[in-house]
Amino acid sequence: MSEKLAAVILAAGQGTRMKSSLPKVLHRIVGKSLLGHVVQTAVALDASPIIPVVGHGAEQVRVAMAGQDLRFALQAEQLGTGHALLCAEDALNGFSGDLLLLCGDVPLLHEETLRVLIDHHRHQAACVSMLTATMDNPAGYGRIIRGIEGVERIVEEKDADESERQVREINTGIYLFRAPQVFALLRDVDNRNVQGEYYLTDVVAAARKAGERVEALLIDNAEEAMGINDRVQLAEAGKIMRQRINATHQRAGVTLVDPATTYIDPDVSIGSDTLIHPGVHLRGQTRIGSGCEIEPGAVVTDCTIGDKVHIKPGSVLSESTVGNDCAIGPMAHLRPGTVLAGNNKIGNFVETKKAIIGEKSQASHLTYIGDASLGKNVNVGCGTITCNYDGVNKHQTTIADDVFVGSDVQFIAPVTIGRGSLIGAGSTITRDVPADALAISRSEQKNIEGWAEKNRQKQKTGKK
Ligand code: UD1
Ligand code: CA
């Protein structure tokens, strides 16, 4: 099919019921703004151009969507949905083809559903096609009024009479129009209705009057057309989207112990036979390998994790790369720029940042490794600190292969530790250490015989 498809996304409304200083379409579910989800669907359909119509918080919306191939249209005053589409006309630049109209606050629509709508519209050579749904409680929605020759018009709830209100088939607010013809029809739409707005829905009656074909496609699952008006619905939609994402992973071979409390962003990928416990958050562009285990309370953001990695409870990993067969945590903190080569152990209360760590090296407890590079088979003892910051600049610690670092060592960077050397516990290392050396820097121990006993006697007797 070579027909052209463009998309307009209505996103100018205030979203009063969100009670928010943030424009409604910028509220997020599963790590992405409502508008971001809708744009993603339009992109998946190869629509071009994609035109969000913005108004309330227009600048904020533009900034938030920067970097995407969008052409924005401004609706300075919100005079209704019909007026909003008219505002996109210039941005369409004479576009001739099928025009998909989406709403920035309807994020759950499946791409597949829209494909069916597009196919139907083209097959029927319709002028207007819309998605409709049947609802047990249609309150608030526009009603689809059908006659013997199909859909005649849409009536808004506020304008409907008693019998029209009984209709349970509703307008989802998603349409396909023949462009540029729709704009000619829109110019004939007035605002003589209860709300004094220019209704996009009136295009249906206008098209029928012009003798054009109008099609309505009833979707099975009304949930898809759910619009977000308040924060209760925002959470509901988030839950539905999470369930979809989780089910996709489960079907692809990922075990989720409790999908209801597992939070996986849409762009995350996970290998098969990975086991994910409750309360895990996988965010952003994270990639997880196969056969991993991720325990409760782990938060992993924008990381690449290899195969058979065990992330233990309460660990936080950001913008880091973890090789195969590593064990992380419990309560480890891998900050941006951490790269673990593989077979590493990063244990409890260990923090790393901009740290390149070679194969089989480990830091098992209570350690800070920042601005550092470690070779292979390095053992970092408990309580070790790379002192990377002198108050003005950050400095590098370099540790070669096979170094053994005793407990409670401070490396005053910049400093380089030679291969196979041994650093005595409790040392403060200020100078480079040659290969195979022992470096030790601590004052010699003095034992004063009987001193403690004498001191106790003194306290018991005369002291005061
Ligand atoms: C609209 C439809 C209704 C449908 C319902 C589905 C009309 C007249 N009614 O009603 O038939 O059942 O959606 O959810 O179209 N917007 C603008 N500029 C405006 C007005 C609205 O950009 O001037 C945007 C809003 O931000 C929102 C969308 O258009 O994203 C829908 O507007 P809204 O006011 O929510 O329409 P409804 O009354 O819900
Ligand atoms: Ca609405």
Image (cartoon, helix red, strand yellow):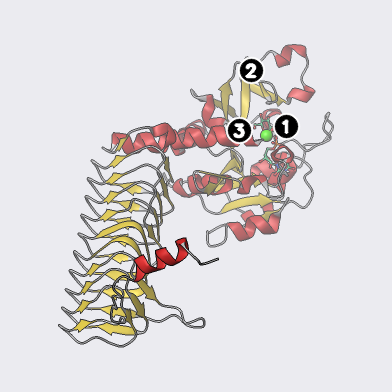
According to the picture, the residue beneath numbered tag 3 turns out to be 233
According to the picture, the residue beneath numbered tag 2 turns out to be 137
Q: Nearer the viewer, mark 1 or mark 2?
A: 2
Quote the CA–CA distance across marks 3 and 1. Answer: 27 Å
Q: Residue furthest front?
A: 462
Tag on residue 202?
1
The image position of residue 197, as x and y in percent, is: 80, 37
Find residue 296 and report its image quarter: top left
Between disc 1 and disc 2, whose residue precedes?
2
Closer-to-camera residue (364/458): 458
Q: Is residue 109 visible?
A: no
Mark 1 is on which residue type?
Answer: Asp
Q: Looking at the image, which residue is at 67% across and 28% down?
A: 208
Find residue 316 and report its image quarter: bottom left
Q: Report whether the residue tagged 1 is closer than 8 Å to ligand 1.
A: yes
Between disc 3 and disc 1, whose residue precedes?
1
Q: Is residue 277 left or right of residue 135?
A: left
Mark 2 is on which residue type?
Answer: Asn
Quadrant containing ligand 1 reads top right
The image position of residue 174, as x and y in percent, is: 59, 35
Quote the CA–CA distance across marks 1 and 2. Answer: 23 Å
Closer-to-camera residue (104/344): 344
Label 1: state its secondary structure. Answer: helix
Q: Looking at the image, which residue is at 66% across and 46% down?
A: 11
